[in-house]
Image (cartoon, rainbow, N blue to C red):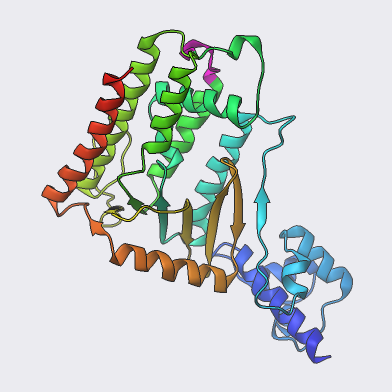
């Protein structure tokens, strides 16, 4: 019986992480099970047992994994897996799902997103259309292995407008979130290698297509440089304005001189945290396991302590860092 109560306790702990911070768990349980508030509290405190039907009802409603509740081994970590359906993948729907997920974070009391970025954070690809189009083309060929004849050569005009439009909306949603990013001098390398590889394969219709992509990469660097200077994220072409609800900045960026090994996104919320790990380029592994999240935060905070803050202050270091990135782009263009 004691283990049964432990399972019920873990169940309600898991349920708490699924609810927006403005909702009372007792009210939710009472409404979903059609019981009184007092009965809901007795179940939450473990004074009354959840029936199997009630357990199944709440688990299904709030997408609670029975594995995460029933396991007794705290060394096991359960991940949800947003995987790409190779046969029926739609970029537009993929971006829309990320837009909805980003927007939902405010319901859970978003405090901060920490993005350790050995590669350019994917949201920045989509602020400028030529770079966005190239990444979509690259993913089609290298992740999905599309063999359509009209996609053998890269051409900006061949990329569907709907995909570019939704990807831009996704990027704009990210720009509204308070974020700490950790970059290194290698952050641009993977995208530059992709451009170079496709250039050597003769997959660009003209040299101008390559120049346009590199120009958009410069625009990304210039934009993030400006965000770092102001300590604020904003939409390119807009006038950055401080949020009237908060006098503090919403963007920090660190220069890490030791190459980061993997893309890790930590989302800090009011009552729990979430870690997203990149897998096979576009697939995402996600967990809210408290021990895993705490360990990830501890590691990232150590990385931050060994990095240089280049937002707002440290103008010399900030200029030096972004100049290094800009020269990488210039070197690529000079060699094509």
Residue 22 falls inside the magenta stretch: no
Does residue 87 lie above or below 27 as drawn? above
Residue at (18%, 52%) from the top-left corner? 312
Give residue 117's position: percent from left, percent from top: 40, 49
Say whether residue 25 is left or right of residue 198.
right
Residue at (73%, 80%) from the top-left corner? 72
Say whether residue 214 is left or right of residue 242.
right
Which quadrant is home to the N terminus? bottom right
Which quadrant is home to the C terminus? top left
Residue 159 falls inside the magenta stretch: yes
* Viewer can see residue 236: no
Does residue 5 lie above or below 298 as drawn? below
Give residue 330's position: percent from left, percent from top: 25, 26
Give residue 121's position: percent from left, percent from top: 42, 43
Query: In the image, which residues are magenta?
Result: 155-161
Depth order, front residue of 218/106: 218
Depth order, front residue of 230/253: 253
Does residue 147 lie above or below 67 as drawn? above
Depth order, front residue of 42/105: 105
């Amino acid at each position: 019986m004691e283990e049964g109560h432990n399972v019920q306790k873990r169940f309600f702990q898991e349920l708490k992480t699924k609810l927006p911070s403005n909702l009372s768990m007792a009210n939710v349980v009472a409404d979903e099970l059609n019981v009184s508030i007092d009965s809901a509290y007795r179940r939450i405190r473990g004074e009354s047992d959840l029936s199997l039907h009630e357990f199944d009802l709440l688990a299904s409603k709030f997408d609670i994994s029975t594995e995460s509740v029933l396991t007794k081994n705290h060394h096991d970590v359960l991940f949800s897996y947003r995987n790409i359906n190779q046969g029926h993948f739609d970029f537009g729907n993929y971006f829309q799902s990320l837009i909805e997920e980003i927007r939902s974070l405010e319901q859970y009391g978003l405090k901060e997103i920490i993005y350790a970025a050995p590669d350019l954070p994917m949201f920045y690809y989509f602020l400028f259309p030529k770079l966005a189009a190239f990444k979509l083309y690259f993913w089609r060929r290298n992740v999905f292995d599309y063999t359509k004849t009209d996609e053998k050569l890269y051409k900006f005009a061949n990329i569907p407008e709907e995909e570019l439009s939704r990807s831009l909306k996704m990027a704009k949603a990210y720009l509204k979130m308070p974020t700490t990013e950790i970059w290194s001098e290698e952050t641009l390398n993977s995208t530059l290698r992709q451009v170079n590889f496709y250039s050597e394969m003769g997959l660009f219709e003209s040299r101008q297509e390559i120049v346009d992509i590199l120009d958009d990469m410069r625009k990304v660097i210039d934009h993030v440089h400006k965000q770092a200077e102001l300590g604020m994220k904003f939409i390119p072409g807009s006038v950055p304005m401080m949020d009237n609800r908060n006098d503090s900045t919403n963007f920090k960026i660190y220069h890490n001189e030791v190459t980061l090994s993997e893309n890790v996104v930590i989302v800090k919320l009011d009552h729990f945290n979430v870690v997203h790990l990149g897998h096979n380029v576009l697939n995402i592994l996600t967990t809210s396991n408290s021990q895993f999240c705490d360990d990830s935060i501890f590691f990232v905070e150590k990385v931050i302590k060994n990095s240089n803050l280049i937002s707002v202050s440290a103008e010399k270091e900030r200029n030096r860092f972004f100049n290094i990135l800009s020269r990488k782009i210039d070197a690529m263009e000079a060699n094509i």
